[in-house]
Image: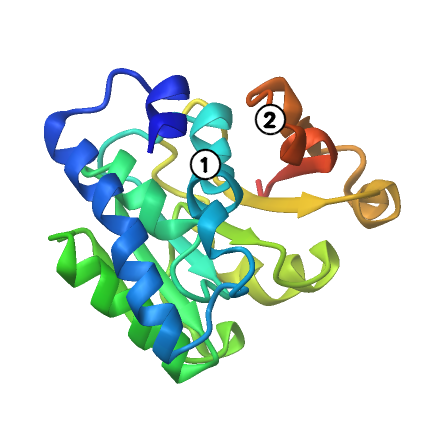
Amino acid sequence: MDLILKYFPNITDKQKEQFSALYDLYLDWNSKINVISRKDIENLYEHHVLHSLAIAKIINFTPGTSIMDVGTGGGFPAIPLAIYFPECTFHLVDSIGKKIRVATEVSTAIGLTNTTFCHERVEDEKQKFDFVVSRAVMPLSDLMRLSQKNISVKNQKNALPNGVICLKGGELQNEVLPYKNRASLFDIKDFFQEEYFQTKKAVYVPVC
């Protein structure tokens, strides 16, 4: 939890309480439904919560922004972002029902009112959103192909045009190549100094 305050010192008391509650909730749920590697649960704040919040270093979502999290798993990156951006709405989608259950239960337990959940494949989602986010779910080309239909080109309200922001690791040059004229690549080590983030990256691709 101290890691969150290190990089986001201005969060409210309510946000502090919500972030603080995540460890025990995920520890409990992970013992029933494995959504985080058992060996990695002790690194929840660094490897999962803070990693998700890298998106908040790339864009400060304007109130009223709608975001879909594709392949959310147990709720990353959407739940940390929903805590941080309480005036935005987050729609969490995953094809595995038990993972959506964990995300739903955690969200309810910490009192989030800006999240909705759907057990489905992204290709079946019909709604429109301002942004799509994801965390190491699928190759960028697949994510763009499946989710581009869900991104509204209207109601531009943020500093960045509506589009896709995904968190990735390792070498991404080949993945980004088809979008090289419009994609932006971010080194997360520029935001967070912990060793874990040395090879972590984020990709932003506008759709308009």
The location of residue 48, given as percent across then percent down, is 48, 47
Q: Which of these two is toward me, 130 or 74? A: 74
Q: Describe the element under mark 2 as helix, strand or loop.
A: loop
Q: Is residue 7 left or right of residue 18?
A: right
The vertical placement of 133 against 6, above or below, is: below
The vertical placement of 196 against 119, above or below, is: above
Location of residue 155 (image quadrant): top left
Q: Describe the element under mark 1 as helix, strand or loop.
A: helix
Q: Which mark is residue 50?
A: 1
* Tag 1–tag 2 contact (CB < 8 Å): yes
Q: Nearer the viewer, mark 1 or mark 2?
A: 2
Report the residue at 59% width, 46% height from top: 166
Rendered-image quadrant of the N terminus: top left
Rendered-image quadrant of the C terminus: top right
The location of residue 20, given as percent across then percent down, is 24, 41
Q: Which residue is mark 2?
A: 194
